[in-house]
Image (spheres, grey):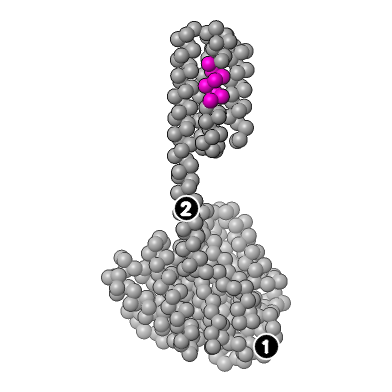
């Protein structure tokens, strides 16, 4: 593309010399700066405009063209060149604004949804946020990991809705989680704190139209000294446990409950399920952008089928494989954001099973 305007000028000169005098190459000379405008700098576009205008005038003088023809063609090329320079200025300003907006959006995402450290509480951690639209940075999916006195606690959630309202809700949920994770002695208590935070915010904003109605979420707690994990699921896609030998289990809740923010519809007490979390195993949490990713035939992506029997060196490799697999499955077309969080236990610990979660083999 960088050489195309120059080629157009050369082609126009050749055509002008190879055709009768009555033929004019002015349209080609005028096209050169227009082609350059969206892709070249202002200086580059100006150079192409000057070359086009000079070539037009020079050829007319060389061929002893009529004065009327010389003035008309030269004025045409000059006018179009001026228009090309104006277009270049608009494109550059738009590009600067877009770049600035992307920088701001990326900074906002890092502030609201920071990437977890790769090692937290002796666990290996990896997270990914894949926006449905190219160039988009923030949306309604969320994740957070925090090391506390009660163990490593984490949350993955999906806010109902899109836009800035969803982003604000993400900030509320993440803020409430970080505070509750440090203060609440039980995972159930953390879930209730999130419920109350959403209820307060909904009241403050005067209803569902101004505040996102609910948030699906799964919370997990990995004690420092026990080889197990506690899970509270509030209407969210079920996590997966990938064993070191390639085995895979679906961690379905024993007592399904409503998403966060729907407490007015009924009171169901949160009850954390416990499952073994052995050495080398990886806990995978995700939002429905993964399971609702469809291919051209409308077939949904099934992580259970795609990951069963596979072994990954660590959580980063697991998430890279999932992201690549989803792109191939959808052909790069997705309609929803996708958040992924993987946590691996690298050291052997003796599991202590207390209350059995309903595990789907």
Q: Is 55 rendered above or below residue 269?
A: above
Q: Which mark is residue 143?
A: none
Residue at 64% over, 71% down: 315
The answer to if 52 sits in the magenta stretch is: yes
Q: Quadrant of residue 90?
A: top left
Q: In screen coordinates, is 194 left or right of 242? A: left
* Label 1 element class: loop
Residue at 51% over, 54% down: 135
- Local packing at callout 1 (Cα closer than 10 Å; few below 14, some 14-19, many 20+) is some
**325 or 19, which lies in front?**
19
Q: Is 337 rendered above or below residue 285?
A: above
* Label 2 element class: helix
Pick whichever of labels 2 and 1 is earlier in the sequence. Answer: 2
Q: Is 110 rendered above or below residue 47?
A: below
Q: Which residue is mark 2?
A: 100
The answer to if 63 sits in the magenta stretch is: no
Closer to the camera: disc 2 or disc 1? 2
Residue 202 visible in the shown view: yes
Report, in whole angstroms, how far the alpha carbon at label 2 lies from the one at label 1. Answer: 48 Å
Q: Which residue is mark 1?
A: 349
The magenta stretch spans which residues? 50-57
């Amino acid at each position: 593309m960088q050489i195309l305007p120059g080629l157009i000028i050369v082609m126009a000169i050749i055509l002008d010399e190879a055709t009768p005098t009555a033929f004019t190459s002015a349209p080609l000379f005028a096209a050169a700066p227009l082609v350059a405008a969206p892709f070249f700098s202002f200086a580059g576009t100006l150079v192409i405009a000057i070359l086009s205008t000079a070539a037009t005038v020079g050829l007319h003088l060389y061929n002893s063209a009529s004065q009327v023809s010389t003035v008309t063609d030269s004025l045409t090329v000059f006018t179009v060149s001026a228009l090309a320079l104006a277009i270049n200025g608009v494109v550059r300003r738009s590009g600067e604004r877009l770049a600035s907006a992307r920088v701001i959006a990326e900074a906002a995402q890092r502030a609201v949804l920071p990437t977890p450290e790769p090692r937290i509480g002796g666990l290996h951690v990896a997270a990914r946020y894949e926006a449905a639209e190219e160039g988009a940075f923030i949306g309604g999916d969320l994740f957070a990991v925090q090391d506390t006195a009660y163990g490593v606690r984490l949350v993955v959630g999906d806010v109902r809705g899109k836009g800035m309202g969803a982003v604000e809700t993400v900030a509320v949920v993440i803020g409430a989680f970080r505070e509750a994770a440090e203060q609440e002695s039980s995972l159930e208590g953390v879930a209730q704190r999130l419920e109350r935070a959403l209820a307060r915010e909904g009241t403050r904003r005067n209803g569902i139209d101004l505040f996102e109605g609910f948030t699906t979420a799964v919370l997990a707690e990995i004690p420092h000294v026990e080889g197990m994990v506690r899970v509270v699921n509030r209407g969210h896609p079920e996590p997966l446990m990938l064993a070191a030998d390639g085995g895979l289990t679906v961690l379905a809740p024993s007592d399904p409950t409503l998403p966060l923010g729907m407490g007015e519809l009924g009171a169901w007490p949160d009850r954390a399920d416990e499952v073994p979390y052995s050495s080398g195993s990886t806990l995978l949490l995700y939002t429905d952008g993964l399971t609702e990713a469809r291919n051209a035939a409308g077939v949904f992506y099934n992580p259970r089928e795609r990951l069963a029997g596979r072994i990954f060196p660590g959580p980063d490799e697991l998430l890279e494989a999932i992201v690549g697999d989803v792109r191939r499955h959808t052909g790069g077309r997705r309609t929803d954001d996708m958040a992924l969080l993987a946590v691996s236990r690298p050291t052997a610990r003796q599991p202590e099973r207390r209350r059995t979660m309903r595990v789907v083999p």
